[in-house]
Image: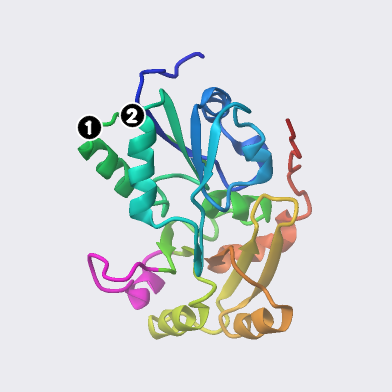
Amino acid sequence: MNNIETQTGKVYLLGAGPGDPGLMTLKGKALLEHADVVVYDALVSEAILAMINPRAERINAGKRRGRHSKLQGETTRLLIEKAQDHAIVVRLKGGDPFVFGRGGEEMQDILEAGIPVEVIPGITSGIAAPAYAGIPLTHRHYSSSVIFVTGHEAAGKYRPQVNWPAIAQGAETIVIYMGIHNLSHIIHQLQVGGLTEQTPIALIRWGTCPQQEELMGTLGTIQQKVEETGFEAPAIAIIGSIIELHDILSHSQPVVINQQR
């Protein structure tokens, strides 16, 4: 296998991208095809899982709201244990390992255990899902700055909660990961920060997958639309005037590759 070390006892933190298997990197695909063990997340698509070496051991370590297959510490210990017996251990994570993927935490713990680690980046949903919906995050006439922020924070974290009023004035485009369950609170705080009820917002569910869904509105209307449609996570939110381009650019949708082994 080109450009991928097969040193015994190495863990690879691999970004699976947002769902469309066509967005998996060539290096990531080659790694899956040669893996001995793959520990994967809940949001990794079936088409990506189909790339895994059929002889590899597969372990589901998925985390969904209220349904955790394994706790974070258990997952890290599992990776360390598997790396002691196998050459190529892959931690397959949705999106990018270092963008709200806890990749930094896992890498730190694994290195402290004396196990070598390599990161293989993936395309994060905060970039890919808006693109598939015809929403550019930057545009010379609409937005020259973007903020990526999580809408779901860990308990007992290193600092107080996100300063949403500051975020409201921090960039022209705001991309919120995992914010559907806290949407009401987030919208209120953004309005405290100066955004108006007329500020456009887009919610994108299952971004880049064949079942991708989009819900458009404003900060003043989106909560009612969510209730009326039953719109649920997993989804991201994009806020800003850039969303006005959706009606113009969304008519040419990318082709989602339905790749099977």
> In this rendering, which labeled residue sits more in front, label 2 or label 1?
2
Where disc 1 sits, the SS reads loop
Q: Residues within 10 Å of mark 2 (few under 14, many from 20)?
A: few
Is 15 one of the magenta-colored residues?
no
How many dots with numbers? 2
Where does label 1 land, which residue?
A: 114
Part of the protein shown in magenta: 153-171
* Amino acid of disc 1: Gly
Q: Is residue 160 above or below residue 137?
A: below
Q: Is residue 52 visible?
A: yes
Is 208 on the left or on the right of 125, as rendered? right
- In the foreground, 202 or 109: 109
Residue 169 drawn in magenta = yes
Across and down, in percent, residue 47 comes to 68, 40
Residue sitting at x 69%, y 50%: 209
Left or right: where does residue 103 sit relative to residue 240?
left
Tag 2 residue: 84
Q: Visible in this render: residue 139?
A: no
Residue ID at (62%, 57%): 135
Image location of residue 157, percent across then percent down: 27, 66
Of callouts 2 and 1, the N-terminal one: 2
Residue type highlighted by circle 2: Gln
